[in-house]
Image (spheres, grey):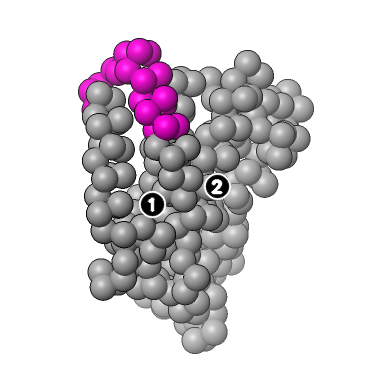
């Protein structure tokens, strides 16, 4: 039997490409421009000093199982950096990751609401501070901060979606107030959007996860599979 290849119009092909590749739209393209100032808010000397302090703060965490004492010390040090320079975006992403480490696996338990709120607030601050006025051009430092923050937040949304799916009500019962009461499907949409942004700023894994979690891509994929079965088997899907 000869299997003919389904033909797609150029418009259909573009729609499918957009669904399955969140970075395919020209409006979403970002140029990482090394000629830009790393973080416009700081001089080179100020930035170098902040980066040294930040590396010192998180260095003890670069082990498989950091102690609670080291985690708490890192949070204190990063908080000190943020207090002295509240516009330094990278410290927020690292504090979010460190607080996330302190929480452990049960992210959305009622007992951890204050801490997980802090993580989301820090990620939002990092994104706000690092997002440039000209969204089409970012420095390598800005791109790294944005990729990290969006990807981390997407992961949290995905964990929230899993928690919602496992609850008896089908809604998220713990976690930040703005997420409480959301359904699994809505949280997956939010995760997909942030994964797409993480991919946009250079995180390859985030780009792949954006496709896997995109509800429209999943729906479209199911439709395409069914259409191909119909095309191949002449309307008798599932038979040979």
Residue 199 visible? The answer is: no
Residue lying farthest to the bottom in this orientation: 10
Name the residue located 40 percent from the left edge and 37 percent from the top edge: 81
Residue identifier under label 1: 145
x then y, percent, for residue 206: 40, 51
Q: Looking at the image, is mark 1 or mark 2 earlier in the sequence?
A: 2
Q: Secondary structure at mark 1?
A: helix
Task: Return the residue nearer the eye: 149 or 126.
Answer: 126
Residue 98 badge: none
Name the residue located 76 percent from the left edge and 27 percent from the top edge: 169
Residue identifier under label 2: 124
Circle 1 Cα neighbour tier, 10 Å, few/some/many (<14 / 14–19 / ≥20): many
x then y, percent, for residue 141: 32, 57
Give residue 53's quadrant in the image. top left
Name the residue located 52 percent from the left edge and 40 percent from the top edge: 122
* Residue 13 drawn above or below residue 160: below
x then y, percent, for residue 60: 25, 24
* Residue 65 drawn above or below residue 240: above
Name the residue located 40 percent from the left edge and 19 percent from the top edge: 72
Q: Secondary structure at mark 2?
A: helix
x then y, percent, for residue 33: 30, 71
Give residue 43's quadrant in the image. bottom left
Residue 43 visible? The answer is: yes
Magenta residues, as a range?
62-80
Query: Does the magenta-highlighted stretch encompass residue 193?
Result: no
Query: Does the magenta-highlighted stretch encompass residue 78?
Result: yes
- How many badges with numbers are in the image? 2
Quadrant placement of the N terminus: bottom left
Task: Return the residue nearer the eye: 25 or 18.
Answer: 25
State the separation of the CA atoms marked 1 and 2.
11 Å
Q: Is residue 87 left or right of residue 90?
A: right
Q: Main secondary structure of the magenta part?
A: helix
């Amino acid at each position: 039997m000869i299997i003919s290849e389904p033909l797609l119009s150029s418009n259909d092909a573009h729609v499918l490409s957009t669904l399955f590749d969140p970075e395919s739209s020209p409006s979403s393209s970002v140029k990482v421009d090394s000629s830009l100032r790393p973080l416009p808010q700081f001089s080179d000397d100020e930035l170098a000093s902040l980066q040294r302090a930040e590396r010192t703060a998180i260095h003890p965490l670069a082990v498989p199982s950091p102690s609670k004492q080291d985690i708490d010390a890192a949070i204190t040090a990063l908080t000190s950096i943020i207090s002295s320079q509240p516009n330094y975006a990278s410290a927020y992403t690292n504090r979010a990751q460190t607080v996330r480490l302190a929480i452990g696996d049960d992210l959305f338990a009622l007992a951890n609401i204050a801490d997980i709120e802090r993580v989301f607030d820090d990620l939002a601050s990092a994104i706000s501070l690092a997002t440039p006025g000209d969204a089409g051009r970012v420095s390598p430092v800005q791109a790294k901060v944005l990729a990290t923050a969006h990807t981390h937040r997407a992961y949290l949304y995905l964990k929230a979606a899993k928690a919602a799916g496992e609850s008896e009500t089908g809604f998220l019962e713990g976690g930040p107030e703005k997420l409480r009461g959301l359904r699994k499907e809505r949280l997956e949409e939010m995760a997909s959007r942030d994964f797409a942004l993480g991919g946009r700023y250079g995180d390859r894994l985030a780009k792949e996860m954006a496709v896997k979690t995109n509800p429209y891509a999943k729906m479209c994929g199911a439709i395409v599979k069914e259409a191909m079965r119909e095309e191949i088997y002449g309307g008798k899907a599932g038979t040979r």
